[in-house]
Image (spheres, rainbow, N blue to C red):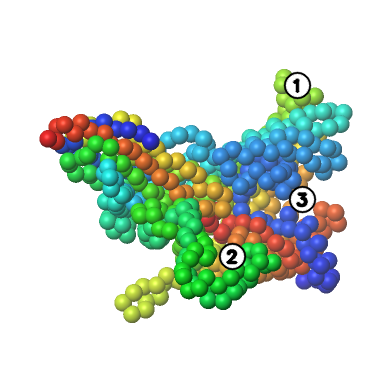
Amino acid sequence: MPVYKMDPLESVDVDIRADTPSVFRFIAQKRVPGRDYKDFASSADWGRESQSRYSFELLPPIRTYTDLRIYFLMDGAAGRPTRIQIGLSQSGQPIGEAIVCEGRIDSEGSMVFSTAEATLVTNEATLI
Amino acid sequence: MRALVTAPLLGVFTFAAALSAQLPAYNIPDDPAFVFLNISPKRIANPGTLPALGVALADGIDIDGRVNAGLAVSFLPSSLVRYTLMPEGYRNGMPAFWFYNTQISIAIVRKSGDTASTDLALGFRTILFGPEPYSDREFRNSIAVVLDRCLTSAQGVDTALVVIQRRTGVRAAPVRDTARPQRTLPPNDGSPGNQDTARMWTVRANTLDREAALECGARGKSRALKAWMKGHWNDATLAISAAAGSRFDKSAVGDRTSLGRSLWLLGAVPIRRSRVRGDRTERLNIGQLAAQLHYMATPSGTGGIDASFWEGGIRVMAGRANVNAFAEGTRNLKRSPAREERNSWATGVEYMIAESLWLSAGVGERYSQLLDDHRDFVFLNLKWGIAREARLGR
């Protein structure tokens, strides 16, 4: 699981982008230490229209070892690859490498289920 | 019309199988290089299902009775090259759409016999315009709704977690042990004890079950595709296939002769009408008018005779997405010393008996090379994945 170091007092912008002509939807969850995962964003929040790009933010303060998990369900033409990039940034600056979720719609047209996970590490001392 | 063939059904079916190859297909070849060398996908281990790279051995016996052995490769360049094409840029009829729907085919066949020559053909197929659901915003939105619903319904179920729980109870009378029938369990005097175990599915908070999501997605997608096809089965289509080949005598690279080139064009327009119902205008799909052109250029053979030809055909059909009546005619457009004028026609009905599988029945007339005459015929055959099926997305 990728680990991203960040400023706990800045909001984290999560940018999800499709790289292929596919349709995808997601449910994003976060977990702070000692708690269960909770939904905090979903493509359904953007209405019923399919979009190729979704952006949302994780508001501060950000606890260290916060886990981020995004479930994707992707669809596209049979036999075609599907690819989604998830980029994290703070104050417009990207934090680390983007996460790439890849899959291939099989010849029967079956969809792709994929999960992107990341751990956010901060210097919590700045919160005190 | 001359006397029709009135053979029993099975006989007609077998006869028709041989004839079907000569009927206008109204579908350009996905792998023109294979067709150019007469190694149709039927004779290859089906490389034409659009994998990233389909490779198959092309073994078979050609029309002259020689054993062919070779390799057939088919691939979509857009699947091999890593590049970004966002859904908004993927629109029907645009250059990105053409590239995304281009398929390359390469075939190499080594012929047995005295010459031991090797034939090489290269070809491509591009769909310039066609019924492609994923280029349609309306379809993408309907799939998005399905995906949202499936993600939500898959939440809170974790079928990977199995918990054995103990159940307590009172056994008032002796009972036979179900696990060991030769043993009898005594009554336990009303005091509760551990009697049994129960297997339970437990819910783990906020996890999504992959299998449940995919199963739900497959069901929803099938419904969405059927609904979309109902309104788009006869959409305008424009596609092109081309192939060229060379022969290497004695399989020597330096001893090359051209085998010619071939071009297929397919165009189709919908036949529709509008109907006003209340304050809404409805679009009614009636049928489709399709035209096909095939050009074959062959190098001058014995005596410099030009055997090149153009062949064109028109097909009109009316009906619904899964059943229609059709009439079609084909004509050789250029008469050459090496090729007689050839006409053929057919009319009949087609019914989709399964996904991409059509039953076609009717009557027609075609040119018989064997008898040097035009012959009437009856046909009843199966067609796999013909043009009006969504060729691109399933």
> At which x and y percent is residue B215?
49, 58
Q: Chain of mark 1?
A: B
**Which amino acid type corresponds to the residue marked 2 in the rendered image?**
Val
Left or right: residue B49 versus residue B128 is: right
Disc number placed over residue B316 in the picture, else none: 2
Left or right for B61, reference B179? right
Residue furthest to the bottom? B278
Q: How many marks?
A: 3
Q: Quadrant of the N terminus of chain A?
A: top left
In front of the other: B346 or B75:
B75
Q: Are marks 1 and 2 on the same chain?
A: yes
Q: Chain of mark 3?
A: B
Q: Say what amino acid the circle numbered 1 marks.
A: Ala
Q: Is residue B17 above or below residue B334?
A: below
Q: What's the CA distance linking mark 1 and mark 3?
A: 35 Å
Q: Which residue is mark 1?
A: B252
Residue at the disc numbered 3: B340
Mark 1 or mark 3: whose residue is earlier in sequence:
1
State how far apart marks 3 and 2 are (Cα).
Answer: 26 Å
Circle 2 crowding by C-alpha within 10 Å: few under 14, some 14–19, many from 20: some
Q: Do the residues marked 3 and 2 share a common chain?
A: yes
In the rendered structure, which disc, 3 or 2, sits on the residue that comes first in sequence?
2
- Quarter-wise, where is residue A98 in the image? top left
Q: Estimate the x, y position of residue B208 in percent, counting from the top left.
A: 40, 53
Foreground: disc 1 or disc 3:
1
The chain identifier of the residue carrying mark 2 reads: B
Mark 1: few, some, or many residues within 10 Å (few <14, many ≥20)?
Answer: few
Between marks 1 and 2, how big is the CA–CA gap?
48 Å
Q: Of circles 3 and 2, which is in front?
A: 2
- A124 or B2, which lies in front? A124
